[in-house]
Image (tube, rainbow, N blue to C red):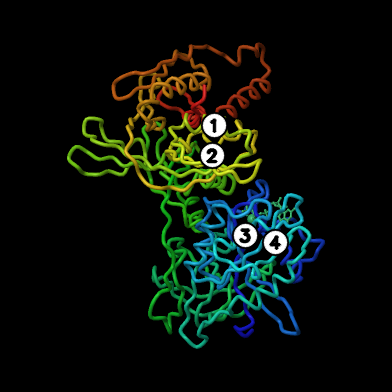
Amino acid sequence: MKQENIRNFCIIAHIDHGKSTLADRILELTGAIDKRELKEQMLDSMDLERERGITIKLNAVQLTYTKNDTEYKFNLIDTPGHVDFSYEVSRSLAACEGALLVVDASQGVEAQTLANLYLALDNNLTILPVINKIDLPSADPEKVINELETIGFLRDEISLVSAKTGQGVEELLDKVIEKIPAPKGEKSAPLKALIFDSLFDSYRGVITSIRVMDGEVHVGDIIKMMETEAVYDVVSLAVNTPKEKEVQALHAGEVGYLYASIKSISDVHVGDTITLESNPAHDRLPGYKPMKPTVYCGIYPIESDRFEDLREALNKLKLNDAALVFEPETSKALGFGFRCGFLGLLHMEIMEERIEREFGIDLIATSPSVVYEVELTDRTKVIVDSPVKMPKREVISKTYEPYVNCSIFTPKEYIGSLMELCQDKRGTFLNIDYLDSERATLHYELPLSEIVYDFFDRLKSCTKGYASFDYEIIGYKESDLVKMDILLNGETVDALSVIVHKDFAYSRGRIVCEKLKQIIPRQLFEVPIQAAIGSHIIARETVKALRKDVLAKCYGGDVTRKKKLLEKQKEGKKRMKQIGSVEVPQEAFLSILSTRE
Ligand SMILES: Nc1nc2c(ncn2[C@@H]2O[C@H](COP(=O)(O)OP(=O)(O)OP(=O)(O)O)[C@@H](O)[C@H]2O)c(=O)[nH]1
Ligand SMILES: [Mg+2]
């Protein structure tokens, strides 16, 4: 197909504003999918996405659309809206010439609407503003039009649609054809294809998603990855329609999958440029800026002999999620594992779940920690992304922690309890915007570490789930921080150490000890639990000894019954980790998170 009939665009928006639902309507209108086969949010194909009702991964599909007897090819990319997955958005943008910026007609412009808009502008994309959900009784399109006007859009370029009923979607596609420029790759130039995503498939190896910028690639070509210099034969090429359809070639302007029986995962870097070995391009495409993690935690296999499996799982997941970073780490308590960095708490939770589900490895994750900066007495600066790396108190002169600007969107009646919560969390009040007589947005400055603790749970419970929040990191501030250790049976458990604000150390120490007392099952001996700062013990609890002989009940010789009981006991132990002489369940590592009594 001629390039002038191709349109590459993505859908971007704040979370839940209806991107995937709009994609459904576009799939339907272009006849890509039979109405009977259509599921809601069709492109959310991962189980996790469907269960949670959110998009986690970018998803590219190729559609054919005929208008006035001309056939057009749309390459559409649906992106996630949650801030933790914004790397998926920025990678999608680089593969497109245009973006549909969707705004919920009842919610209006929100934090990620703007963040994604700026990302798209940075990539020089043509942006079509779309107001969605106009069918909702609470929709206020006029107000949202005003908001869009203040950020620089013109009234008559804004489309009004309902992704639910389909109203306005056909007109939107006409605008896509009219307004979004066709790709302008040079067909005869040497091949340059951007790897914007990749995936490990156990049958076919590494699959790369590519956008051909210049030239063309054919099945059988010998390709070269420009950054890693790996060379491979192209085994097959395909497009997602959303059924996979094999093709013989991909040309300038097109998007598709490339299979090359890639053996070594490390040969593939998302953001790298693919060219032909025989006729290579001179320079690489700009690729992507790596993302900086904001939250770190240690991840350990419960069964220590699965460490290598875990390494492989992380390597494979990294192909599919370029924002993940990890490096090996050892813990005295937990053995060999990895220190992993994530873009946020949801990202962390999703990755842990994917490792357990997709690779069947049971994990222990230590409590998440933010990245601290420590200035030593000799003026050098140290970056501390794990409590274990905290220098000794004697050599520390100043400690700094990351702060965020937090906006909490809430019905009016919860303002009081939210202010209390933010005070509790060392917050500084900035201001409050009343959106109308019922709703307001509270702005606070908070330490990121307080959000990593139980902020979200408490926010939900004090507003019955009606409030939502968003934050952006604003930089580092000096703060009086100490490392708090937890000792079990007199031994420091490095995986339970946390960095806390000095004023909160005592209360948190006490709460953690109490929690651990409830969680750690009784053992054959007494187990003291202590919290300490340096050599100074600040809290203590004791788990009483217990002698429990499960087989005592089975007098007589009923072997099967005995076996069953032992099996049952073994199951219960599966999620336990032996630390020194004490058996500790997985929850113990998360108990550090909870600050509530
Ligand atoms: N009434 C109404 N509901 C809609 C419309 N579009 C989407 N929704 C609903 O809004 C919710 C979120 O829709 P999604 O399409 O999953 O939103 P999304 O933007 O893809 O969300 P993320 O990918 O997680 O950021 C779902 O419950 C949809 O059914 C619409 O036009 N009208
Ligand atoms: Mg979605």
Judged from this view, the residue extending furthest toward the bottom is 188
What is the distance, in whole Å, between disc 3 and disc 1 at their CAs?
54 Å
Q: Earlier in the sequence, mark 3 or mark 4?
A: 4
Q: Can you see residue 65?
A: yes
Task: Tell me where residue 308 appears, x and y as whole percent.
Answer: 45, 47
In this figure, which residue is indicated by the disc labeled 2? Answer: 362
* Amino acid at dot 2: Asp
Q: Secondary structure at mark 4?
A: helix
Quarter residue 21 falls in: bottom right
Q: Amino acid at mark 1?
A: Arg
Answer with mark 4 or mark 1, whichever residue precedes in sequence.
Answer: 4
Q: Mark 1 or mark 3, which is nearer the start of the sequence?
A: 3
Query: Closer to us: mark 2 or mark 3?
Result: 3
Whether residue 303 is visible here, answered yes or no, is no
Comparing 372 with 261, the one in front is 372
| Amino acid type, label 4 | Leu
Mark 4 beta carbon near ligand 1 (under 8 Å): yes
Give the numbered dot on residue 146.
Answer: 3
Q: Which mark is residue 575?
A: 1
Residue of label 4: 22
Q: Secondary structure beneath disc 1?
A: loop
Query: In the image, residue 205 lies at what x, y percent?
Result: 54, 63
Q: Secondary structure at mark 3?
A: helix
Quadrant of the rendering where the N terminus is positioned:
bottom right
Q: Residues within 10 Å of mark 1 (few under 14, many from 20)?
A: some
For the residues carrying marks 4 and 1, which lies nearer the camera in this image? Answer: 4
